[in-house]
Image (spheres, coloured by chain):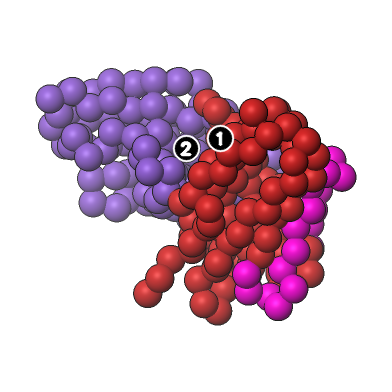
Amino acid sequence: AQTVTQSQPEMSVQEAETVTLSCTYDTSESDYYLFWYKQPPSRQMILVIRQEAYKQQNATENRFSVNFQKAAKSFSLKISDSQLGDAAMYFCASTLTSGTYKYIFGTGTRLKVLA
Amino acid sequence: GAGVSQTPSNKVTEKGKYVELRCDPISGHTALYWYRQSLGQGPEFLIYFQGTGAADDSGLPNDRFFAVRPEGSVSTLKIQRTERGDSAVYLCATGSKGGEQFFGPGTRLTVL
């Protein structure tokens, strides 16, 4: 069975600084996808970044990048130049590349950005 | 284009009542998922439709929960004899099979 663990219930970062959110996962499969989603108070889940497990290169989207360590089953999110609009809940999720493609989510990390 | 929409946005009901939650997918999306997000938790999978059929309903907590998608587009999640423990945000997500899932804004269900 797949599991996703986020061990940081809450993190704070000063505006313009860098913060890293941690995520570990477990799966017996070799091919899967990993995601980071942002959920502001509006409840809308917004895709931040996606990583395919077969790709060794870490995904990057503007100020967001990941550190994907497949052997360690670790998938952390780095946010550079943090902005007030980055404040939200962040969820790590995984899905297999076959079957139902249902997402397995972690419990989330609340990110606060301090002005 | 329009995203995934869910109605109602909020629903307050009394214990023991029946509720229906609606999801309107992005046009053309064949895959549709329902998730439940309890307070302080991440979303948990409930059911997956590919077209009209429920391809995986392993996440439904018990037989009070049921979902349909009769024409392969709009889906309705139905909860009978609601309990206080059913209070949560119910999220719908749609996509192409194997592709990215796009989430709706959710329905917040409160059972008094």
Q: Position of residue B43 (x, y in %)?
A: 58, 40
Res A23 label: none
Q: Residues within 10 Å of mark 2 (few under 14, many from 20)?
A: many
Label 2 marks which chain's residue? A
Q: In the rendering, at what x and y percent does residue A103 appear?
A: 61, 48
The chain to which mark 1 is attached is B
Residue A79 falls left or right of residue A107: left
Which residue is tagged 2?
A91
Q: Kindly indicate which chain is depicted in purple in the rendered structure.
A: A
**Residue B31, magenta (yes or no):** no
Residue of label 1: B42
Q: Is B66 contained in the magenta span?
A: yes
* Element on which disc 1 rests: loop
Mark 1, Cα crowd under 10 Å, few <14 / some 14-19 / many 20+, is many
Q: Give the percent coordinates (x, y) of residue A47.
A: 41, 52
Residue B18 versus residue A74 in the image, above or below = below
